[in-house]
Amino acid sequence: MLILIIEDAPAIVRFLKRGLAAHGHNAVTAEDGEEGARLARDEPVDMVLLDIMLPRLDGHQTLRRIRLHRPDLPVLMLTARDEVQHKVNALDGGADDYLTKPFDLEELMARMRALTRRSDQPQSSVMELGDLKVDLRSHRVWRGGRQVDLSSREFALLEYLMSHKGQVLGRQQILSAVWDYAFDPGSNIVDVYVAYLRRKIDRRREPSIIQTVRGAGYRFEAPPDTQSS
């Protein structure tokens, strides 16, 4: 792959170029956001590693420019800021993933592989399992034709569970995917939000479509394809 590195710290650029080359990737680099946005537009790059703190245009401004011309180009943002809100802003601004500095090269490569798999798959804006329908663009959900109002975090959790239907997902796995790697592994936030989701999308006197697997986590089971008034 051809990777665009938009980063103004020479030591990090050297580290990234060596690591990418060792894994068979080529790289082009930009030291500021304006040049990075131009290269993303004009060069046949397959992915962007984008720093947030940049001269001329910061990472968020650069990302907005990239999305104008390459809306589907995978972008992984690199940030020295570990605060959750900065990462939320990056993802809400259109980044596909983020990584906090300092980071391990193998974790970076794993995340790049995940983004590549995702970008290679045909994209659909609607997920339907049984009588549960999720519109990924409008963030709307229906169960049996009835619209269900979900918060943004509930929606993200439901999308993740549906994407892994039939699989047992551990709490830490869900925590990392839906929330943030910096969250306390001992937190019960996953259980709390699973309970929220169950109250909103399950039906009375029917088994939950989010099943608890004792000692392991949760498993999403597709509901039957039936409609209710």
Image: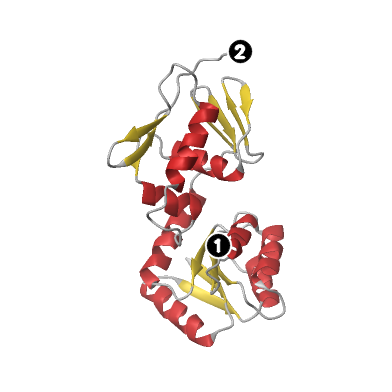
Identify residue type, mark 2: Ser
Does 28 sit left or right of 58 as displayed? left
Q: Nearer the viewer, residue 191 or 226?
A: 191
- Classify residue 206 by image quadrant: top left
Q: Which residue is mark 2?
A: 229
**Is 85 left or right of 120, judged from the image as shown?**
right
What is the distance, in whole Å, between disc 2 and disc 1 at their CAs?
Answer: 41 Å
- Nearer to us: label 2 or label 1: 1
SS for dot 1: helix
Residue 180 percent across, percent down from the top left: 48, 57
Residue type marked 1: Val
Q: At x 45% / y 23%, what residue is drawn?
A: 223
Q: Earlier in the sequence, mark 2 or mark 1?
A: 1
Q: Residue at x 41, y 39 (%)?
A: 164
State the residue at coordinates (36%, 75%).
22
Viewer-closest of 179 and 18: 179
Residue that carries the numbered disc 1 in the rendered image: 84
Given the current orientation, which residue lies at the most extreme bottom position? 10
Please state the horizontal and vertical placement of residue 133, each as a whole percent of the image. Answer: 56, 28
